[in-house]
Image: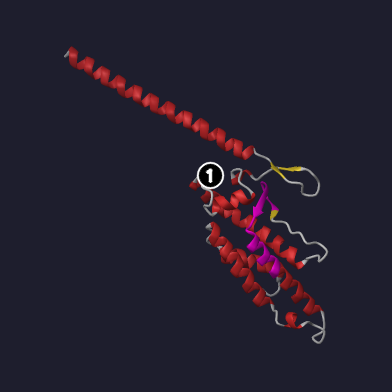
Amino acid sequence: MLYTLLTLTIVIGIVLTALLLFVLGKLTWLESATSSLLTKIEQPLTQNAGHGREIQADPYFYGLSGQLLWNSLTEEDTGQSTPLELEEIRPRYGIALLKAVVKFIIDGRDFDASSSTFELEKLVFTSRGGITIWLPPTKIEALRLIGTKISKFKQSQAASADSASASAKNLNSDQICGDITAEVIEICESVGLRHGNDIALDVCKAFFPNTVD
């Protein structure tokens, strides 16, 4: 009987020791993960923004921004965030992407022939801070070309039918919105967003508020 109790005590002691070590291991991992997350959240987003001031990054993007954010969402770089973090980021990225796409298109619409340089990324703001949106150069050029089409279309509306250029006469808002939709959907598919049509519709409304349903 004494032997049985001694054996039972030893087994219970081993089990409790194993549980204690397991809990301590989990606490150590949790502390490390929390420290890493706080480092990402507290990382400032430094942008000139025309005033040389420091802008606080949106913490809900876990420290990702610019091309690094794009590479993470397109899975070109899988070492910067976890799959769970990316799934949380994607819907927030969609809102920031909408604002950035509008800015890229405006670059083309308001193109100054005296300037040969374009920004490769756009700083946009959410309710929690700033985030820089980077797109591949080919996408940026496509969006700026759409901006140029919008500019020609607006000019053709303001001019008389006789003075409008041939290229402008062939443009209409439906065609331009079709171009916007195609580009936005392709971008959204690249980063795993499922609501490209909705984002494209909002972009179209930004430039054609009276013609888009």
| Furthest residue toward bottom | 162
**Residue 196, image quadrant:** bottom right
Could you tell me how many numbered marks the image carries? 1
**Residue 43, image quadrant:** top right
- Stretch of the chain drawn in magenta: 123-146
**Residue 146, image quadrant:** bottom right
Residue 133 inside the magenta-drawn segment: yes
Q: Quick one: quadrant of the N terminus?
A: top left
Q: In the image, what residue occupies the spot 78% across and 79% down?
A: 156
* Residue where numbered disc 1 is placed: 81
Looking at the picture, how far across and down is residue 169, in whole percent?
73, 83
| Furthest residue toward top | 2
Looking at the picture, how far across and down is residue 103, in whole percent?
71, 60
Residue 128 inside the magenta-drawn segment: yes
Looking at the picture, how far across and down is residue 24, in whole percent?
43, 26
Of the pair 206 and 142, the residue shown nearer to us: 142
| Furthest residue toward left | 1
Residue 18 appears in the rendering: yes
- The amino acid marked with disc number 1 is Ser
Instruction: Please indicate whether residue 99 sits to the left or right of residue 70 in the image.
Output: right
Q: Residues within 10 Å of mark 1 (few under 14, many from 20)?
A: some
- Asked if residue 10 is positioned above or below residue 136 in the image, the reply reads above
Q: In the image, what residue occupies the spot 60% across and 48% down?
A: 68
